[in-house]
Amino acid sequence: MRQLTLTLVAVTGLALAGSTLAATPEECQESLSRFKDLGNVSTLLGEAHGYAILPTIGKGGIGIGGATGKGCVYQGDTYQGEVRMTQLSIGLQLGGQAYSQLILLKDNEIYDEFVGGSFEFGADANAVALTYGASATAGTQGTSAGASATQSSGDGVGAWRRGMAVFTIAKGGLMYQAAIAGQKYKFHPKGD
């Protein structure tokens, strides 16, 4: 048991340390291309006013957990600046995980709200977990395994909810508890 705990602490530390590095626009576009291949992401992206892409979010916890990651914000196809996500959680959780996240912003109003300072997902937020290749996927109901480029949770189709659509792709690790509720985003315009 002690070895398992030490392993989980090490994985958590590595996941969180790795995700604190700034994401370049090139890394963001590479991550975006993986999302475009899955589900109806391309269709919704074509309808979006803007989007945020976070190539790597590191998440870990044993009872008390946290997550962090940096990414890029685009209005249309134009890079507008950097976004940083943080999350603190308390409750039933165990493990460490790294994943990518795409947040589509349907119109100018929700885009302005997202980039207007600090933005936070509420308790009713959810994400569609997508599988890319053979990896574990994180959904809002826990963790599952998959080996195809299909949606693995949600109602089978990504959809707009309150002007946003949120998607995740697991990159590695295993964690029970993968909700996006409570995530906070801080936007920094390019040049700041």
Image (cartoon, rainbow, N blue to C red):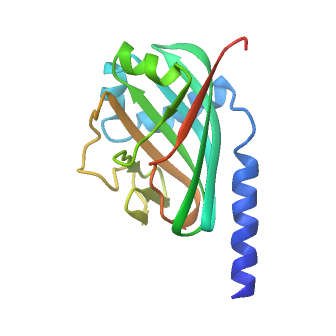
The answer to which image quadrant residue 15 occupies is: bottom right
The answer to which image quadrant residue 109 occupies is: top left
Is 186 displayed left or right of 123 in the figure?
A: right
Viewer can see residue 169: yes
Viewer can see residue 96: no
- From this viewpoint, which residue is outermost toward the bottom? 1
The percent position of residue 21, horizontal first and vertical second, equals 75, 38
The percent position of residue 159, horizontal first and vertical second, equals 26, 37
Q: Quadrant of the N terminus?
A: bottom right
* Residue sitting nearer the eye, 132 or 94: 94
* Residue sitting nearer the eye, 83 or 54: 83
Is 133 displayed left or right of 63 in the figure?
A: left
Whether 121 is drawn above or below 58: the answer is: above
Identify the residue shown where x is 75% and y is 59%. Answer: 13
The percent position of residue 185, horizontal first and vertical second, equals 56, 34
Identify the residue shown where x is 46% and y is 50%. Answer: 132
Whether 170 is drawn above or below 5: the answer is: above
Identify the residue shown where x is 73% and y is 69%. Answer: 9
The percent position of residue 148, horizontal first and vertical second, equals 39, 55
Whether 148 is drawn above or below 113: the answer is: below
Whether 3 is drawn above or below 51: the answer is: below
Is 37 displayed left or right of 160 in the figure?
A: right
